[in-house]
Image (tube, grey):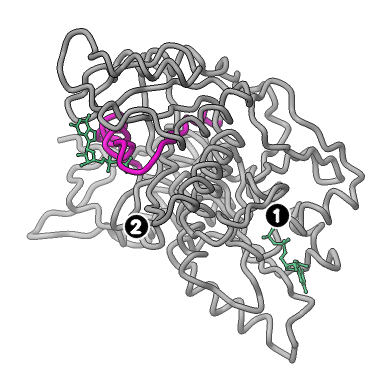
Amino acid sequence: MSKPVVAVVGRPNVGKSTLFNKLVGQRLSIVDDTPGVTRDRIYGECEWCGRKFTLIDTGGIEPNTKDVLLSQMRDQAQLAMDSADVIIMVTDLRVGVTAADAEVASMLLKSGRPVVLCVNKCDSVGDPPAEFYEFYNLGLGDPMAISSVHGHGTGDLLDKVISFLPEEETEEADSSVIRVAIIGKPNVGKSSLVNCIAGENRCIVSNIAGTTRDAIDTEVENSFGRFVLIDTAGIRRKSKVTEQIERYSVLRAQMAIERADVCVIMIDALEGFTEQDSKVAGLAHEAGKGCVVAVNKWDAVEKETGTMSAMRTKLEEDFSFMSYVPILFLSAKTGQRVDGLFETIRQVAESNQRRIATGVLNDVLAQATARVQPPTDKGRRLKIYYMTQASTRPPTFVCFVNSAELFHFSYQRYLENRIRETFGLNGTPVRFIVRERK
Ligand code: GDP
Ligand code: GDP
């Protein structure tokens, strides 16, 4: 199930990244050696009193003029209002209340979203200083005094955040509905695809009950099932400033990914694969979601015999870090192969939540280890005693082995491929957890 999203907003230098790192701690979910993943830490998993949520840092851009600062602050706040369940607004005790703070506060206040206002850099313990009380003027209720560097007040902050989180969804609440995020860089055709689908299916465009976001998700029902197209904040409401800034489009994608079961990674057929595509795709892969690559604007490509297969081969190389991903060529403009997209989304969603019985899994393991012997090192051979599926979304397998060190990546990849082949796990990441048992 998707986790709630908590967004951090605030001016540059108030201490957003420091707070982010404090709250996320060791649980940073971005693994540096995963190819295709941004090194910029923009999101992390948090857990407090048994509640899990994703924390997103919306900051990180240093505008050089006052004008740009204000418009970026507005965009940042809008992004948070679109996709977050709770917003943490960070201010700086030493600087006091600024015009930009007031502007953002009034936007957040109007939106009616749950906001936790904190005044950072309250480093001394005890009663907050007189300057602290100035922050009541922002109209966001009681400010919380915190020190991100020392950690004071962050527990109270988390208590307040989780008090605003929506009720936890039950597993079967809407298990027949597949939530789809269409992600990709600006101008690849995301909104065109949503419009194409919406037009064809005469779907109900509605603000789905129970959410507090500004984003408008689109419900679709067709012969392949029931779907919700997640509004990637900005598909329906574009902003001139943020559209140009890569970090914002990555952030937007991240927010949509968190809420999705399946991610459609859109590539522009005319431009081919770019660095930014690999970042966005890497985020979906990392999050363990079902993935489909949709190569859009296929109508505009000059085609000769073999054009599609040549492009497919090239893309398979570009996406070698997620070799399981199906690649589709379509056109949001003409509607070509959009039906096929839904069929693939359905399959991918099923793979992503597939549960494999332990007995069958171990049969496959026995056959696989008989066919290709596990690796040895200095006379010791890897033994895999037993395997069991620990969870779904994505399928995660626990392997009990004699030595984790001997369980090399290449052999894991081999087993993964055997499991994929046998069970048809198309379009989903698969994870292994290795446990040593002497
Ligand atoms: P961001 O631009 O909002 O992400 O701000 P940063 O997290 O990069 O912090 C800006 C500066 O403020 C850095 O020099 C931090 O070390 C400092 N800072 C952040 N939090 C605190 C705090 O609680 N107390 C003090 N004294 N300094 C802080
Ligand atoms: P977004 O920024 O990803 O939402 O992209 P848009 O949907 O706004 O599309 C950007 C531009 O690409 C627009 O001018 C669209 O008309 C054009 N476009 C989108 N899909 C297609 C397509 O399938 N074929 C062609 N030829 N143009 C497309």
Callout 2 crowding tier (Cα within 10 Å): few <14, some 14–19, many ≥20: few
Above or below for 321 versus 51: below
Question: Residue at position x 80%, y 60% from top?
Answer: 338
Question: Residue at position x 43%, y 28% from top?
Answer: 89
Does residue 11 belong to the magenta stretch? yes
Above or below for 51 versus 433: above
Task: State yes or no: Cβ of the residue under disc 2 lies below 8 Å from any atom of ligand 1.
Answer: no
Q: Which residues are magenta?
A: 2-29
Question: Residue at position x 29%, y 36% from top?
Answer: 15
- Amino acid marked by disc 2: Thr
- Amino acid marked by disc 1: Thr
Total of numbered circles in the picture? 2
Viewer-closest of 56 and 218: 56
Residue under numbered circle 1: 344
Residue 216 shows up from this direction:
yes
Residue 299: quadrant of the picture: bottom right
Q: Quadrant of the N terminus?
A: top right
In the displayed structure image, the side of residue 352 where residue 380 appears, left or right: left
In the displayed structure image, the side of residue 275 where residue 437 appears, left or right: left
Camera-side mark, 1 or 2: 2
Residue 416: quadrant of the picture: bottom left
Residue under numbered circle 2: 34
Give the mark, 1 or 2, whose residue is nearer the N terminus.
2
Above or below for 242 versus 48: below
From mark 1 to mark 2, how far is it between C-alphas? 26 Å
Question: Residue at position x 66%, y 24% from top?
Answer: 211
Residue 389 shows up from this direction:
no
Does residue 37 belong to the magenta stretch? no
